[in-house]
Amino acid sequence: MEEFLSLTLGGVVNGSVYAAFALALVLIWRSTRIVNFAQGSMAAATTFIAVAVIDSGQSYWVGLIVALLAGLVMGALIERVIIRPVEGGPELNAVIVTLGLFIAIQGAVALFAGVNQRAFVPPFSNIGYEVREGFTLLSLSPNTIWTVAAVVVTMLLLIALFRFTRLGLAMRASAFGQEVARLLGVRVGRMLTLGWALAAAVGALAGLLIAGDVSFISPTFMDQLIVFGFVAAVLGGLDSPIGAVVGGLLLGLALNYVRGYLDDSLLGMASLVILVIVLLVRPGGLFSTTPARRA
Amino acid sequence: MSDLQTPAGAPGAASDDAPSTATAAANASSAGAGGRSFLPKSTLLRHLLVLALCAVLAVLLLEGTERSTNDQISRIAFYAIAAGGLTLLTGLNGQISLGHGALMAVGAYTTALMLDVDGDPLPLAVIFLVAVAVTAVVGAIVGVAAARLHGPYLAGATLALAVGVPGLTLYFSDTLGGEQGINVRAPRAPDWFVEGIEALSGERGQGTKWLAYIAVACLLISYFLLANLMRSRIGRTWRAVRDQEVAAELAGISLGSWRVLAFVVSAAAAGLAGGVLAIVVRLTAPGSFLPVLSLSLLTAIVIGGLGSLFGALLGSVLLVLLPEWARDFGLEVLDMESAQASQAAFVIYGLLLVATMLFAPAGLVGTVRLALLRRRAARAMSRAGGG
């Protein structure tokens, strides 16, 4: 029972990071109909930038802000320069372009930072609270609380942006119908760039959070997370931000039970199985009401 | 079932399809198009002739180069076999796969396990056939799921495969060797081969040389089979499934089963590639089958030209040579560590992949072929105008 409780809590913590990552994918998918497979590499790159900042004597929080800004800039640049020409083209071309970025950015990170793993010190202690005499809840530590809180705050900010601001309305309009939005005077191109920038910043946050969670980083440490984020996004329907959050939490729970009761090495396979089952049974995601999109 | 796999962007589908069709058309073998070909008309005869020519060239190449080059050629061979299968799947059938590295792992581990027995292992040909069969079965399972997916969904699912399979080798570490992997006992060259090489070039036909001959033979045989398949009724059906789903279905083609078949054939090639990898590298370990292997294969076929076997071969040459150049450059010019310097190759792959998609989506082979066709057309026009 205690193990189950611990695993469940840990699942929620991991799930919130997956949710943030899935959210980044969904933001991009909604506006440009592209799954950004480079998201993981981009997040790894911003994490290494943050580490470089921290290494130079700054605090974690300066590193975090630099990483988020780097994510914003990187996302905007990539959309503007590389993605724009393939938007609306054959879907295979867009997939291949993001995969090219995946390899290139990962290679660049390894080129500058080396291929080996290195330690990453989280901002708060990773030692679990002692709930009662002799029972330490490993998955409830100051750092996991920070992780969940950071994700929740990010989500509230995003909801506020999309619900209550004109900018958010314009972004939603460009995602909903580019032609109509353009006719109504929305600068759709800018909104798409902004969408990518925001998504990359959310991805950057997820990268730093997961780095603090596992306490090590390497150029490839986000490889698994891009898959988990994608599975979570597909669980939620790839189109809905709320779906991405719920999908992330569900996947976090499922994978943590696999980790606890079976083995760490089966996580990738487990996510594949979940993905295939979802796509075969409910291709529109868990919350789909309409039949699968034809367009 | 088919309504689940409509490509995105169905409104204006015709214009959406145009670039990919152009790519495919550019890479379709032009031998059937008439022209001034001096090769025989029959596809089989023509391919046999090319096969024989390539075999002679390969022997000259292997005998005319040094040991280290022989080793490079063997590595090019296994990349090229897998890339050939992938180009059939992605180029001809329009299904992307980021999981071919994982399928290579299946073939490699099967080979390694069958060679790792007490006493004499089975003949290598039998082992390779088993590896191909096992991988084809895995490919069929993946293919059944894949046939219902498209574009980014398929890419994500196969990427999950690429991430998941190395984990399996850790989970079953008792049989599969865990992180350390399995050391492969490379097969010994038979006497007739050693004597033959001795007579041919006076060199020793052991070790690396024998493995290089096996690798090249596997490459030639698999490309011969793939080339025939691509130009047969089956290949045409795959193209129809790729380009015009609705029309193909109306013509009585079952989209799903043809997609699965493409996946099975492609997986079989990856299995053979894995088998060759196992004996050439003499080690199968999860570190060799990371997702980046699958992405490298994709890079090879896109840069070479989607749907073209020759393009897949060119891309594979790049996959082997580029990291070595990058490492030499990094070591000598930039004074870096070798593992770090070879990463520059991945930066170049990625940028090449992006650049190819943006500026020349038909890849090397397709772009050159298009340019030639255009020049020929221009010349014909001017001749017609002048005369």
Image: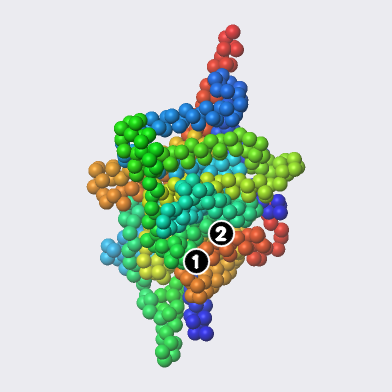
How busy is the neighbourhood of tag 1: few (under 14 within 10 Å), some, or many (20 plus)? many
Quadrant location of residue B31? Answer: top right
Q: Position of residue A64 (x, y in %)?
A: 38, 65
How busy is the neighbourhood of tag 2: few (under 14 within 10 Å), some, or many (20 plus)? many
Residue B370 visible in rendering? no
Secondary structure under tag 1 reads helix
Residue visible at 60% across and 64% down?
A236
Residue visible at 47% across and 48% down?
B123
Callout 1, which amino acid? Leu
Residue B215: give its label: none
Relative to A146, B150 lies left or right: right
User: Which residue position holds label 1?
Assistant: A267
Describe the colour scheme in one phrase: rainbow
Relative to B239, B334 lies left or right: left
Q: Position of residue A282 (x, y in %)?
A: 66, 62
Residue B371 visible in rendering? yes
Question: Of discs 1 and 2, which sits in the foreground?
Answer: 1
Callout 2, which amino acid? Val
In the figure, B180 relative to A101: above or below?
below
For disc 1, the chain is A
Label count reads: 2
Q: A243 or B22, which lies in front? A: B22
Q: B40 or A248, which lies in front? A: B40
Q: Position of residue B352 (x, y in %)?
A: 43, 41
Q: Position of residue A270 (x, y in %)?
A: 54, 65
User: Which residue position holds label 2?
Assistant: A26
For disc 2, the chain is A
